[in-house]
Image (cartoon, rainbow, N blue to C red):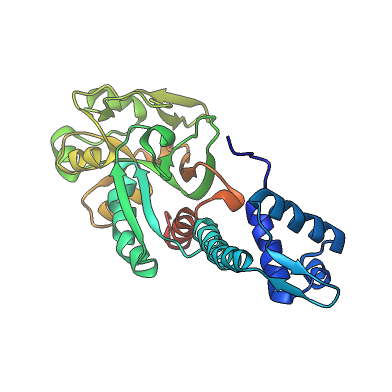
């Protein structure tokens, strides 16, 4: 069974420097070692290999045929190791496959339009984009990065804030023409309030009364959806009233396709969007670091 305490790459580096500089002392200065340490290392290397690599005299060093073969092989191995380290290092050019998980609205409206520009900047990065409003386990899904909206659960993941946006209650003009416009939060009891078919950290819609007291109403309408983009489409289709992040429906409001409701009772709470990932600092792959920086550069939520 081979020993595991031998630094073979270190031996190769010392040996190649001795050969190139033709001197134990010069190699020692170059490698910041003592001449005796270099001499002992070469002696141990020859003993382990069972062959003489260098012939020593008072005037010069002469490499043996076995030493020459070891030197040439060592150069190739050291070059391959350096190339491998550069490829894996965070500072290397981004390359490889990047798997990104995102909630559906952010993925469709913000990530999809950015992917072509990102890949034009980093042509050696392939992007796998998976959209779901369910919170996934990054390690289980083998995802490099995920987009999370709203409060973050405690975890070992690293989070980078991409922005925040105000929440707003909206309905389509067609729905309001049929069912009327609510004037106070209590009027919502008469309306179909769109909700999600999965549990969320905060289910209730918060309001602030004219007396400054907070209240909350749970959406309990006839329609439940699986993701935020489906809820937006249902709202546009006149299915009911929904609560959305302003970045998600701002264009619909500006175009008159949706109407903000009960703004006088809006508590002004915001939804924060983060990119979460595993690993940090020098251990973060270059492709992940590049994508994070690109998102921070391009994403504007308000």
Q: Is 268 rendered above or below residue 68?
A: above
Residues 113 and 206: in front is: 113
Observer-nearest residue: 191 or 8?
Answer: 8
Tell me residue 268's x, y (percent): 47, 41
Q: Is residue 222 left or right of residue 87?
A: left
Q: Is residue 250 visible?
A: no
**In x, y percent, where is residue 91?**
55, 62
Residue 229 appears in which quarter of the rendering?
Answer: top left
> Who is closer to the viewer here, 100 or 53?
53
Quarter of the N terminus within the rendering: top right
Up-down: is 22 above or below 110?
below
Q: Quadrant of residue 25?
A: bottom right
**Residue at the spot 67% in from the left edge and 45% down from the top edge:** 6
- Residue 222: x %, y % from top left: 18, 23
Figure label count: 0
- Which residue sits at x=36%, y=43%? 101
**Is the residue 45 above or below the residue 203 in the image?**
below
In-image side of 230 versus 6 (left or right): left
Residue 13 visible here? yes
From the image, which quarter does the C terminus lie in?
A: bottom left
Asked if 36 appears above or below 100 in the picture, the reply is: below
Question: In which quadrant of the rendered view does residue 193 lie?
Answer: top left
- Please indicate whether residue 275 sits to the left or right of residue 120 in the image: right
Residue found at the very far bottom of the displayed protein = 59
Residue sitting at x 33%, y 57%? 126
Q: Nearer the viewer, residue 246 or 189?
A: 246
Counting from the top left corner in percent of width and height, residue 245 is at 37, 44
């Amino acid at each position: 069974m081979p020993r595991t305490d031998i630094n073979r790459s270190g031996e190769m580096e010392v040996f190649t420097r001795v050969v190139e500089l033709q001197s134990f002392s010069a190699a020692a200065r170059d490698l910041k070692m003592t001449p005796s340490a270099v001499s002992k290392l070469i002696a141990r290397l020859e003993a382990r290999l069972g062959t003489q690599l260098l012939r020593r005299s008072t005037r010069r060093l002469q490499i043996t045929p076995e030493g020459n073969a070891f030197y040439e092989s060592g150069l190739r191995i050291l070059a391959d190791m350096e190339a491998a380290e550069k490829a894996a290092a965070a500072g290397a050019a981004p390359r490889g496959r990047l798997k990104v998980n995102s909630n559906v609205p952010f993925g469709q409206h913000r990530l999809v339009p950015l992917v072509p520009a990102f890949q034009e900047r980093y042509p050696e990065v392939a992007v796998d984009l998976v959209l779901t409003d369910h919170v996934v386990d990054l390690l289980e899904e083998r995802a490099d990065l995920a987009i999370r909206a709203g409060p973050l659960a405690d975890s070992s993941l690293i989070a980078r804030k991409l922005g925040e946006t105000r929440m707003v209650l909206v309905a389509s003009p067609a729905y309001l023409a049929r069912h009327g416009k609510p004037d106070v939060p209590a009027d919502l009891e008469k309306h179909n309030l769109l909700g999600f078919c999965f549990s969320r950290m905060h289910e209730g819609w918060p309001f602030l009364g004219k007396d400054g007291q907070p209240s909350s109403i749970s959406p309990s309408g006839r329609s439940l959806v699986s993701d935020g983009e489906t809820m937006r489409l249902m709202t546009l289709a006149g299915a009911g009233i929904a609560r959305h992040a302003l970045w998600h429906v701002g264009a619909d409001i500006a175009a008159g396709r949706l109407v903000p409701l009960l703004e006088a009772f809006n508590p002004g709470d915001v939804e924060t969007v983060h990119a979460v990932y595993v690993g940090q600092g020098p251990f973060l792959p270059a492709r992940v670091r590049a994508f994070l920086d690109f998102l921070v550069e391009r994403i504007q939520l308000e």
